Image: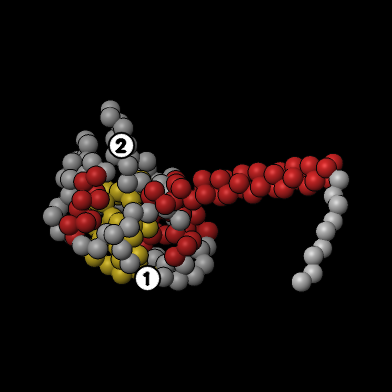
Amino acid sequence: MIIVTARVPKRRLLAGGITALCCCAVVAAALLVTLGGRAVAASAEVKHIRTNDDRLAYLGGLGWQVSPQPIATEELLIPEEFDDSYAGYLKLQQDQGFDLSRYCGKRVKRYTYQLTNYPSQAEPVQIALLIYKDRVVGGQIQSASGSFLHGLAMPEAGGSGAQPSASPSLAPAFGDLV
């Protein structure tokens, strides 16, 4: 059995302890910043959406009333790389806490429902959800004619809430996912 002893002055021991404490504080701050950025995306991407009833419950939780069955169900391929034509659509999704770049090259399903309680709108309005496996990864509300497109949130009272697409590439970018 070998025993090794060392004599460390209290000053060096204190300096080492303070240095270790500072390092721990920096790592903790970095984790908070990193996890804080992901918390938004995690809250937007809802898991366990497997059935039509799950999708209806999710949309109902957002305040929407929709047709009981989707008017369209499509399988889409998210491109491996996004070009500039996708910028507006990606920003719309990011503003809602969705990050489609995490699903590049993946196949998602788009379920489109007819909205029945969209405020003050003469033309038909649709809501679409993008589902990867059992997770909502994106979505939008759009007029049937394509005159507006915006996020899943209920519009503010008193306004239509529709944000007309300023960029003509906003709607085509979504259509090109097919």
Query: Residue lying farthest top?
Result: 158
Name the side, left or right, on which 63 lies relative to 175: left
Q: Nearer the viewer, residue 123 or 48?
A: 48
Q: Residue at x 30, y 37 (%)?
A: 155
When the figure is inspected, residue 176 is found, relative to residue 60, above or below; the finding is below
- On the image, which quarter does residue 49 sit in? bottom left
The mark found on residue 44 in the picture is none
Name the side, left or right, on which 41 lies relative to 12: left
Location of the C terminus by quadrant is bottom left
Q: Nearer the viewer, residue 172 or 27?
A: 27
Q: Residue at x 52, y 67 (%)?
A: 81
Name the side, left or right, on which 31 lies relative to 58: right
**Do residues under tags 1 and 2 come within 8 Å of each other at their CB atoms?**
no
Q: Answer whether residue 175 is visible to the viewer in this image.
A: yes
Residue 54 placement (x, y as % from top left): 21, 56
Q: Does dot 2 land on a helix, a strand or a loop?
A: loop
Q: Answer whether residue 115 is visible to the viewer in this image.
A: no
Which amino acid, mark 2? Pro
Residue 67 placement (x, y as % from top left): 14, 52
Query: Residue lying farthest left?
Result: 68
Residue 9 placement (x, y as % from top left): 86, 45
Q: Residue at x 84, y 56 (%)?
A: 6
- Count the labels in the image: 2
Residue where numbered disc 2 is placed = 155
Q: Does dot 1 land on a helix, a strand or a loop?
A: strand
When the figure is inspected, residue 40 is found, relative to residue 52, above or below; the finding is above
Residue where numbered disc 1 is placed = 107
Q: Residues within 10 Å of mark 1 (few under 14, many from 20)?
A: some
Which amino acid, mark 1? Arg
Which of the two discs, 1 and 2, labels the residue nearer the N terminus? 1
Q: How much space separates mark 1 and mark 2, taking CA atoms?
A: 30 Å
Location of the N terminus by quadrant is bottom right
